[in-house]
């Protein structure tokens, strides 16, 4: 039997559809702000990180969707999340096409140490919706811009294969990080018995360690699945001046098991505390989880 939590891999068809459409909605809501950020980004090289940020934000805001869909398969969650994010990226490109169509002229933006030139435009949402429904026009505009170029880097016009390469890189970066931004939610402890996600409880009180037990001893024990240090928990009354542990508890009544993530704090000779990660999602009996909750909450 595993000493640590391992997702069951279970999922339901309705959960898959819920996650797909939920992620698509989240990605669509963030698409227009993303398009504007790319358009008005004053530093070209900084724009490379915007697709990554966009993908990470979609994954972060989709936390509730993954939980609601009750998908306990991280690979599937990543796949569905990436596929669900595609409509958002397409909407961002539709927004970009509208911005190209509505160019008003050149403007300037002061960064303090330098002034950069920006292309001013407008983005009516009605036009975005209309453009979204006309993918052939988006491809036509991208082809036209790809041939002529729209901006310059160090005085050199970016067009042709270089511009197409940038668009491909944008899509690849977005899809790569989107495909890795959802599985972490599916890895959180879930009770198949109660059919619920375990709530995350950050215990406020520190766990005291016996005088003869070091944080390293606790780490070795927990790594081997030994939970003796958690069986009879006592609060450390003076955690600033003693070795102790801090716990994140995942506990549900009648769930049969509970899980803890453990951080150790070792007192150094200088008087400061050294924090170290000891264990993630360590399985403990339900009664131990209840005892930890009652004594250290």
Image (spheres, grey):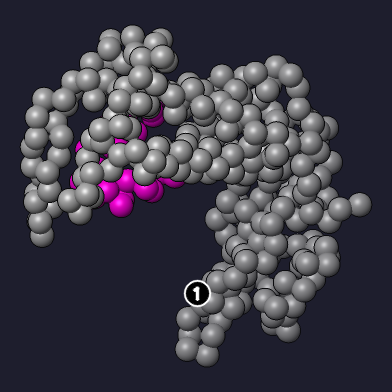
Task: State the count of labels.
Answer: 1
Can you tell which quarter of the image residue 98 is in?
top left
List x then y, in percent, for residue 166. 39, 42
List x then y, in percent, for residue 223. 78, 67
The answer to whether residue 235 is visible is no
Majority secondary structure in the magenta region: helix
Which residue is pictured at 32% across the width and 46% down the height?
47
Above or below, 126 against 201 in this view is above
**Residue that protrudes farthest toward the right in the picture:** 1
155 left or right, relative to 294: left
List x then y, in percent, for residue 281. 72, 53
Asked if residue 32 lies in the magenta stretch, the reply is yes
* Foreground of the two, 164 or 85: 164
Above or below, 232 against 10 in this view is below
14 left or right, relative to 288: left
Chain part drawn in magenta:
29-53
* Foreground of the two, 183 or 131: 131
Which residue is pictured at 31% across the width and 16% down the height?
128
The residue that disc 1 covers is 240
Above or below, 168 against 287 in this view is above
């Amino acid at each position: 039997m595993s000493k640590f939590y391992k997702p069951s891999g279970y999922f339901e068809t309705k959960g898959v559809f819920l996650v797909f459409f939920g992620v698509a909605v989240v990605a669509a809501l963030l698409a227009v702000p993303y398009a504007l950020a790319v358009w008005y980004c004053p530093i070209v090289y900084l724009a490379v990180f915007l697709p990554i940020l966009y993908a990470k934000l979609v994954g972060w805001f989709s936390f509730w969707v993954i939980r609601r869909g009750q998908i306990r398969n991280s690979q599937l969650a990543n796949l569905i999340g990436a596929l669900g994010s595609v409509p958002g990226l397409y909407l961002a490109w539709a927004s970009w096409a509208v911005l190209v169509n509505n160019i008003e002229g050149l403007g300037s933006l002061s960064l303090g140490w330098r002034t950069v030139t920006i292309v001013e435009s407008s983005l009516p949402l009605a036009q975005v919706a209309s453009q979204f429904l006309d993918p052939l026009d988006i491809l036509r505009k991208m082809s036209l811009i790809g041939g002529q170029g729209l901006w310059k880097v160090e005085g050199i016009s970016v067009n042709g294969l270089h511009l197409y390469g940038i668009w491909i890189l944008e899509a690849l970066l977005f899809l790569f990080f989107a495909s890795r931004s959802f599985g972490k939610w599916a890895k959180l402890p879930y009770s198949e018995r109660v059919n619920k996600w375990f709530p995350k409880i950050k215990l406020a009180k520190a766990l005291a360690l016996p005088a003869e037990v070091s944080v390293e001893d606790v780490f070795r024990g927990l790594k081997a699945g030994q939970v003796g240090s958690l069986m009879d928990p006592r609060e450390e009354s003076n955690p600033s001046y003693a070795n102790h542990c801090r716990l994140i508890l995942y506990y549900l009544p009648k769930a049969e098991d509970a899980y803890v993530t453990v951080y150790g704090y070792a007192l150094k000779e200088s008087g400061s505390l050294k924090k170290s990660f000891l264990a993630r999602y360590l399985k403990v009996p339900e009664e131990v989880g209840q005892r930890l909750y009652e004594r250290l909450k």
